[in-house]
Amino acid sequence: MFFDPVYLLFALPGFLLALWASFYTKETFATFSRKRASSCMTGAEAAQKMLHAAGLYDVRIERVDGFLSDHYDPTVRVLRLSPAVYDEDSLSAIGVACHEAGHALQHAQGSISMQIRSQLVPMANIGSFLSYIVILAGFFLQTAGLIYFGALLFSFVVLFSLVTLPVEWDASARAKKYILKAGIVTAQESEMAGKVLNAAFMTYVASAVSSLLTLAYYLLRARSMDD
C-alpha cells in the first residue's frame, strides 16, 4: 500500500491540507496573541464570565500543560486551558478559552451533535486502531473481503470526523456570541478573536477531508481486487 502511487493521489491532498491548516492556525494564534483585549481579561477569566453569563456556575476551569491542549471534559465538567490561554489576556487566548466554554454550554444544554460524537468515541478509537491491521492483512493476502471489513471499521473514524464539524462550528458560534454579549471584547476585537476560531476550525475540516479520501482509497482497492 505504501508504494502504491494511487495511494499518494488520495493521501497527498489531505496531507497538504492538514499541513496548511496546522500552519495557518498556529500563525493566526501567534498573530492575535500579540493583541491584548481592552478588558484585560485572561482566557480563564473570559471563559468564566461567559459561563456565568450563560447561567453555568458548576464548571471548573483548570490549567493544563501543553500548547493548545485546551479542551472541555464533560465527564467531570472541567474546562482545561493551556498556559498560553489560561494566563494570557490576548484575543487568541480569549477566543480559544471561550470556544471551549462553548462546549460546556453544549453539554449543559444537551446538544444532540455533541451527544452523538461522544457515543462515537469508543467506536472511532477501535476503528482507528483495528482497521489498519485488517486492511494490511487484506493487502498482504490479496483478500477484498478483509479490506472491505477494514474500510467498515475505518468508516467510524470518518463518521466521527464528520460529526465533529458541526460540534466545533457550534462551539465557536456560541463563543462569538457570548464574548460580545458579556462585554468580554469589543465588536472589533470580536472579529479578530473570531479569526482565530475560524483558523482552528480548518484543522477539523482537513481531518475530515483526509479521512474521507483514505476511505475512498480503501474502497477503490477492494473493488479492484473484486474485478
Image (cartoon, grey):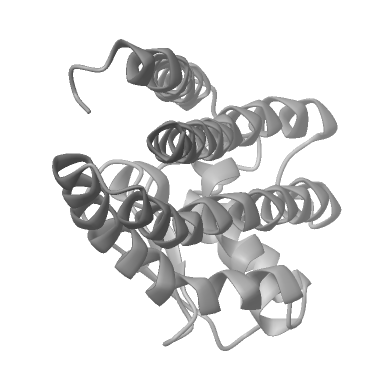
x 44%, y 21%: residue: 10
Foreground residue among 10 and 187: 10
Residue 226, position in %: x, y? 44, 40
Q: Quadrant of the N terminus?
A: top left
Q: Quadrant of residue 57?
A: bottom right
Q: How many marks?
A: 0
Foreground residue among 48 and 9: 9
x 55%, y 32%: residue: 209
Is residue 49 shown above or below 193?
A: below
Compared across the picture, whether 2 is left or right of 24 comes to left
Compared across the picture, whether 86 is left or right of 146 comes to right
Is residue 29 shown above or below 5?
A: below
Foreground residue among 99 and 135: 135
Residue 90 in view (yes/no): no
Q: Quadrant of residue 23?
A: top left
x 35%, y 56%: residue: 150
Q: Residue furthest front?
A: 227
Is residue 44 shown above or below 23?
A: below
Foreground residue among 37 and 20: 20
Residue 80, position in %: x, y? 38, 65
Residue 92, position in %: x, y? 52, 34
Residue 134 in view (yes/no): yes
x 42%, y 87%: residue: 76
Residue 77, position in %: x, y? 48, 83
